[in-house]
Image (cartoon, rainbow, N blue to C red):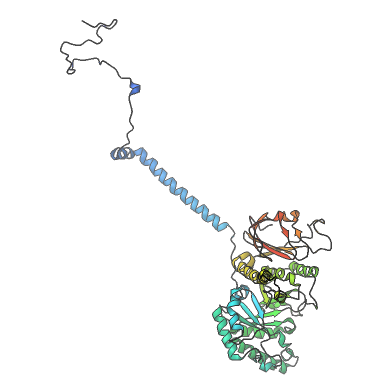
Amino acid sequence: MTLKVEGDPGYGSMSAGCRFTGLDDSETVPLLIPDPELRQHTWKPLNKEELEKCAGGPGWKKIRSCLVLAFWVGWVIMLASAIAVIVQTPRMVTPLLLWWQKDPFYRLQLVVDAENGLSKQLPYLKSLGVGVLILEGLLRKDVSLPNLTQIDRGLGTRPQFRQLMTESRKAGLRIMLDLCEMGPFEPVLSNDTEVRSAGSGYMQDSLRYWLEQGVSGFEFCDTDVTSVKTLMEWGVLMREFSSQDDERILMVRQTGVTLPEVTMSNLVNGSLVKMVTKSLIPPSHHPLSAPEVAEAIETNLQMPQEDWPSWTVGGEVPWELQRTILILIMTLPGTPIIKYGDEINPIQDIYVNVSDGNGDATKQSLDELRRPLALFRSLSQSRAREEALHFGSFIFLPFNTTMSSSTFNATATPPLAFLRSWGCVQFLVVFNLGPEPHAVDPEWAQSLPDSGVFVTSTGLDRLGPVSLQSLKLQPHEAIVIKLFHTDNSS
């Protein structure tokens, strides 16, 4: 039976030669026409030959050359810009400090024998960060100028002193001699030409002897330094024994409020005197009160910082202010000169017999005794590590002009503060010498960054970050804070 479809009589017709075993070439119309949308397109990446054929065209070669050229031109421009920024940016040049500007000095009077004296203390002093020892009272006080080389018999002998010099070099410590206690050198300063010439010769021979032993310099008091000519002669002697890495120096300790007619600025600028040691606390027959100490310190902080100073405590201070003054000495610009005992507690005997039967009070007392020593080490290490505390600029920050009347009464001791800056690093040093706690006035703190971190404190109990807006100073406390996001203009 023939299959017919209306409208398309030829659709589905087969020729007589068609068999089920296969289709021959006589079939002209497929039975089913596949939908084009249903065909699957498979992505096939170009092979190596095809890629080379496409990339080898003239258009691609031009584009590729332009891209390579643009990359190298941009790289050269960025490099040149970076170099220009580095060259034009102001840089903080680290000053080259001399040996007498680096480490703290330590003034002491101890025997120099090897068995029971200073030699055994050298490792301890070096562990404190001390760099120079100033020996007091080493020479006999009843000697004349020709015998200025005689050592006090109660302190040691010449061979023992030479051994001390050898041990000090091994420990990395220098030694200077304090000649203040020898009294004025009348023959050197005499109006008689012959007497002055003979006295000057004797004095130079004595200084030469100690320089040959390896002494790094001498300290005189201002009452003895009244002749520029004498100092010039001694300066020539210092230069004779000096080298590039081992300079010998003269120091002057200021014992009065003012120096003699020979101004120290002229001596320092003329390289005759390297340092002038100033006292923070004026000498007094009795320990000063907290307001008197604060007034003396504020007067020194407001003085212009000229040349390279050195600081010593000077007069007596109440024991509760000792650690506060120690922080001040170690954070001021210049070289700190610490006297024997300043790094330990002067009231040790009070705690010797303290005990509650269980040993707890004794342990607490021993911890209290160790704190000043630990504080000294902390300050010495911070000063050696932080450039801002070592040779940074100094800015005094007065409280009186901004502290509100409600913060403290008229009889209270106001806090003191100053800033040490080097580059983008700043350290804030704040003191509360009075017996009452003080909170930092927010109006005063607005001129400073709000955030910081504690470096050290008198009680060694301040740790971690701090906000100046919430800072409260305890009685007789001093703290050192490293500020964040600082600006030199602040």
Left or right of 17 in this view: 188: right
Left or right of 157 in this view: 12: left
> Which quadrant of the figure contains the C terminus?
bottom right
Front residue of 457/56: it is 457
Point 81% across, 63% down: residue? 412
> Which quadrant of the figure contains the N terminus?
top left
Direction right: furthest residue: 410
Query: Does 142 sit above or below residue 480?
Result: below
Query: Does 70 sit above or below residue 453?
Result: above
Q: Quadrant of residue 87?
A: bottom right
Q: Quadrant of residue 433?
A: bottom right
Front residue of 330/397: it is 330
Query: Does 461 sit above or below residue 11?
Result: below
Left or right of 198 in this view: 403: right
The x, y position of residue 42, in whole percent, is 33, 30
Point 21% across, 15% down: residue? 27
Direction left: furthest residue: 17
The x, y position of residue 51, in whole percent, is 32, 39
Query: Does 440 sit above or below residue 112?
Result: above
Point 52% across, 56% down: residue? 83
The x, y position of residue 381, in whole percent, is 60, 68
Residue 265 in sight in this render:
no
Residue 162 in sight in this render:
yes
Numbered label tally: 0
Front residue of 49/486: it is 486
The x, y position of residue 228, in whole percent, is 71, 83
Q: Quadrant of residue 203?
A: bottom right
Front residue of 81/483: it is 483
